[in-house]
Image: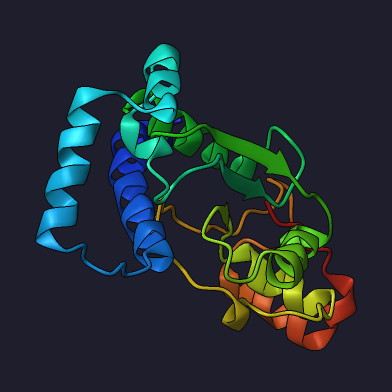
Amino acid sequence: MRRFRNMPLMAALSALLVIALLAGCAAVPAAAPAPAEEAAATEAAAEAPTEGGEAAAAEGMPMAATAGGFPNKALQIMAPANPGGGWDTTARLLAQTLSEAGISPVPVEVFNVPGAGGTIGLAQLVSQNAGDPYTIMMMGRVMVGSILTNQAPVTLAESTPLARLTAEYETVVVPKDSPYQTMGDLIAAFQADPKSIAWAGG
């Protein structure tokens, strides 16, 4: 479990980057009010709190969440796998960090779209959530193999990377009594008969 030791800090830093990038995508320039109009609006706001402001205060939500800017509704994080796996765990840790550290002024929800090594979730993200700054998805290098193996209709080129949350080494492991004791043994056997080697990844 050593690789998860610094994940809360990494998740917090990455969460800040994610929110900044999403806010940048959602920002829409607004026309600056005239000085007289701005002064009148400021005076009126100081004299009487708005209905939205009262609701935000009652629920303990930051005012920014109800000011009509970004974000003004729940953020969605897709884990393109079943609950309990690596992508799901990372997504829930990110959601927890965004909420508990006060980084996100709105709720952060995680939902699962399992199947085909993450490519079903990727296809849903591309087809249903293109341009949606409220929906992001966990993914990793393993999805490259899934796209090729499953001949997925979408590729990673149709998504935009936001932040790197974790890093780990990749290893090749064989049973203790395997006839392949070196990478050279394994490569030679694969070259001689590719179908003779049973592979599994995780």
Residue that protrudes farthest toward the right in the picture: 195
Q: Quadrant of residue 123?
A: bottom right
- Residue 68 coordinates in the image, percent (x, y): 42, 47
- Residue 171, x across and y down, in percent: 54, 57
Q: Tell me how the rendering is colored.
A: rainbow
Q: How many marks?
A: 0
Q: Is residue 170 left or right of residue 103?
A: right
Left or right of residue 62, residue 88 in this image: right
- State whether residue 179 appears in this view: no
Tell which of 38 and 113 is nearer to you. Answer: 38
Identify the residue at horizontal 30%, vertical 47% (top origin).
16
Residue sitting at the far bottom: 191
Q: Is residue 31 visible?
A: yes
Height in image: 169 above or below 98? below
Q: Considering depth in this image, is 141 or 95 the residue closer to the camera?
A: 95
In this picture, residue 120 sits left or right of residue 23: right
Q: Residue at x 54, y 41 (%)?
A: 73
Task: Estimate the x, y position of residue 189 in percent, counting from the top left.
Answer: 76, 78
* Image location of residue 199, percent across then percent down: 78, 63
Q: Residue furthest top?
A: 58
Q: Is residue 153 above or below residue 83?
A: below
Identify whether 64 is placed above or below 162: above
Q: Residue shown at 74%/59% (left/top)?
A: 121
Q: Which residue occupies 80% across, 49% down?
A: 114
* Residue 60: quarter of image: top left
